[in-house]
Image (cartoon, rainbow, N blue to C red):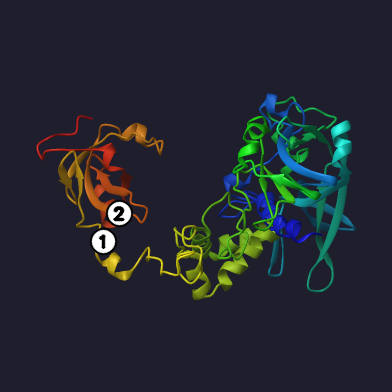
Amino acid sequence: MSMSLSLARAVADAVLYEGYLLYPYRASSQKNQARWQFGILGPPGAAEAGAGEEPGMSADCLLSPGPHADVELHLRFLQLQTRTVEKADGDGRFSPAAELAIGKSRWLSWDEAVEQEITLGPFPVAQLARAALRLPVEVPAAEEIEELADGTGRTAGRLVRRRQALRGEVGLSAAAVSDGPLRLRVSVANTAEEAVTEPGNRQDAIAASFIGAHVLLSLRDADFLSLLDPPGWAQDAVAGCSQHRCWPVLAGPEGQADVLLVSPIILYDHPAVAPESPVALYDSTEIDEILTLRVLTLTEEEKSEARATDPRAAAIIDHCEAMSPEELQQLHGILRNPHAAEFPDSRGILAGTGEEAPAWWTPESEALVEPSTDAVLINGVPVARGSRVRVNPSRRADAQDLFFAGQTGRVTSVHFDVDGSTHVGLVLETDPAADLHEGYGRSFYYAPEELEPLEDGEENPL
């Protein structure tokens, strides 16, 4: 495996499991009783019946091939695995149960998932330009039984894991474009034989789906072109590319372009897992620090249920409980220089000048900023903590803006960020919990141009 592909796989794993299990990681939680993830390719008919997702995804990408260029494709996804708990009734017989406890161990009936990866190729790029390929994907059904014994060695129950067969098709084709690069098109489709036509068949649909589906493409004797930041000569070719339910980005280390990740989540080129993130939390791009603190607030009974729900949930609970204060502090984030691109020299020296780069932040600068007393001029009127304003949202940054338009607020703070922007914090005067929010430092934030200063006597018209 190439180094580029190995590094790209770490990000691809995060994509694969994003949304796999949601906090509080318990089977009894309503949001965990229906599988919700990115990149689900449902069986034919599921989307039309309202029981699942569309069956296909596709993406165009651009590459500059050498004379011996070839491409290898890795289709990666999760296959649903139903885990049924069965209690031993004696005489070698078992009966289904919602839960099984043996000593300190506990299991619940639950839908797990199994990682699958289908590697196809390598295929000569010149061959793809002559004839498109349609490649079948077959994942067989399976059943596995794990017997569970008590402290005396007697069989007390078993776990029965069943997987439904999956069928799909991968398409690959290449075509030259007028200004030089080659356009490569990759498509993946679920081709299950039995179409889902009943609206209530959500469980059947997800059992026959490719979950978290994405593609890694690896080149030899060729380079991919970035669709986010293409060279000028390839702008028209990029405009001619199309994507459906996925987005291709350069993967692997910066400076290399031999691996592409076709992801159901929109990412930037060369994405990477943050080094401050020590464990996969799965919960749909939530913030690690918040989730970790939430896990630590679970009761012992809730943690026990989470551990019994899924081995990955158990690993999350165990890891969060074992974190040191230093590891928790690391989750709070890291201070990075927003002007690093302007001053690339790690010693803080301006490139090509030998002069020291100006500091973007210093304690002295910080001392000059005080949100509780700072003011900003709006329509010639100084606005600071305690000022009354009318809210006229224009950026539509949040759905709440639709309800806050025209209301009056009381300013709680004025913030100036390192990029030169100003943010005015406020609470709404009609909010009965305004004083409580202000006491806890909770505010709504608006740009100065979205606010209108008011005289003290002006009332809220709403």
Quick one: label 1, few (<14), some, or many (20+) residues within 10 Å? Answer: some
Instruction: Specify the farthest residue to the front.
Output: 353
Q: Please determine whether, in this image, residue 435 is positioned above or below residue 368.
A: above
Query: In the rendered image, which quarter contains the N terminus?
Result: bottom right
Which structural element holds mark 2? strand
How many dots with numbers?
2
Residue 283 in the image, given as x and y percentages of width and height: 58, 52
Q: Residue type at mark 1: give it.
A: Val
Query: In the rendered image, which quarter contains the C terminus?
Result: top left
Q: Which mark is residue 459?
A: none
Residue 162 in the image, given as x and y percentages of width and height: 82, 48
Q: Please determine whether, in this image, residue 22 is positioned above or below residue 337.
A: above
Q: Is residue 51 left or right of residue 402?
A: right
Residue 182 in the image, given as x and y percentages of width and height: 76, 37
Q: Please determine whether, in this image, residue 460 is positioned above or below residue 373.
A: above
Instruction: Specify the farthest residue to the left.
Output: 457
Q: Nearer the viewer, residue 43 or 411?
A: 411
Q: Nearer the viewer, residue 269 or 231?
A: 231
Q: Are marks 1 and 2 in contact (CB under 8 Å)?
A: yes
The image quarter in which residue 13 lies: bottom right
The image quarter in which residue 210 lies: top right
Q: Where is mark 2, residue-wise?
A: 416
Q: Nearer the viewer, residue 326 or 61?
A: 61
Q: Is residue 244 left or right of residue 182?
A: left
Mark 1 or mark 2: name the one nearer the start of the chain.
1
Q: Nearer the viewer, residue 359 or 363?
A: 359
Q: Residue type at mark 2: give it.
A: Phe
Q: Is residue 132 visible?
A: no
Residue 278 in the image, given as x and y percentages of width and height: 60, 66
Q: Where is mark 1, residue-wise?
A: 369
Which structural element holds mark 1? loop
